[in-house]
Amino acid sequence: MLQKLLPVIVIIVAGAVGGGGGFFAKSMLSGGDKEAAHEEGEDSHGKEKKKKSGGHGEEEAGSTSYMKFSRQFVVPVVRRGKPKSMVILDINIEVDNSQNESVYALEPRLRDALLTRLLALAGEDMLPQMLEDVEKMELMKAALLETSRDIMGDAALNILILDLGIQNY
């Protein structure tokens, strides 16, 4: 009988210890946050400090966000019917916050259009050359921005290439 009750007792004790530890950790963290907020908000005489805002170089918080694609773009570079290299791109699109929710519904169409444009650029031999020439990189980003604006309208503000890899064969 003790063999059957021992696992149940161990589970109950472990749950109680885990819950108590979580409660203790939460109270320690929230207490530390209150003290930090107290120190930040008041000076040594108990007067509240005024926070400065609107300084040089600040942007309005939350005016744009970034649309991240679920997968990277993999583009083969083909010459004379044979693969020459493979380009892998991690692309994000800077989006106006007012349209942030609706752009994710357009992801399949947008991904198709961008991949088609990337394949066309690969046919023009632009993708491998963009590592050597910044102007080609800017031309490629402008072409992708134009394509994304065809689908999304003015919600697309900029194209960001976060990661780039080229595998030569």
Image (spheres, rainbow, N blue to C red):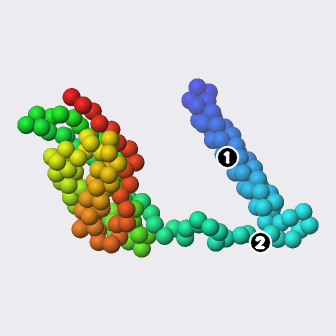
Q: Residue at x 71, y 70 (%)?
A: 52
- In the rendered image, residue 103, in percent from the top left (x then y), is placed at 33, 66
- In the image as oriented, which residue stretches furthest toward the right? 45
Q: In whole angstroms, how far apart are the C-alphas of marks 1 and 2?
A: 35 Å
Tell me if 31 is positioned left or right of 53 in this view.
right
For the residue pair 135 and 113, the one nearer the viewer reads as 135
Residue 80 occupies which quadrant of the picture? top left
Residue at screen point 73% across, 69% down: 51
Q: For this view, does 55 lie left or right of residue 136?
A: right
Query: Mark 1 highlights which residue?
Result: 22
Rendered image quadrant of residue 7? top right
Crowd tier of the residue under label 1, counting other residues whose Cα lies within 10 Å: few below 14, some 14–19, many 20 or above: few
For marks 1 and 2, the one nearer the N-term is: 1
| Residue at image point 70% right, 43% down | 21
Q: Residue at x 23, y 37 (%)?
A: 86
Please state which of residues 120 and 99 is positioned toward the viewer in this rendering. 120
**Whole-percent x, y for residue 56 in the image:** 62, 67
Vertical comparison of 119 with 104: above or below? above
Specify the amino acid type for callout 1. Gly
Instruction: Please state, as top left, top right, bottom left or bottom right, where the C terminus lies in the image.
Output: top left
Type of amino acid at the residue the image marks with label 2: Lys
Residue at mark 2:
50
What secondary structure is found at the residue carrying circle 1? helix
Q: Relative to 49, does residue 160 appear above or below in the rendering? A: above
- Please tell me whether residue 46 is drawn above or below residue 72 in the rendered image: below
Q: Position of residue 42 (x, y in %)?
A: 83, 66
Image quadrant occupied by the N terminus: top right
- Residue at the outermost top position: 3
38 left or right of 111? right
Disc 2 crowd, CA 10 A, few/some/many (<14, 14-19, 20+): few
Question: Would you identify the image quadrant in which residue 92 lies?
Answer: bottom left
| Of the pair 135 and 75, the residue shown nearer to us | 135
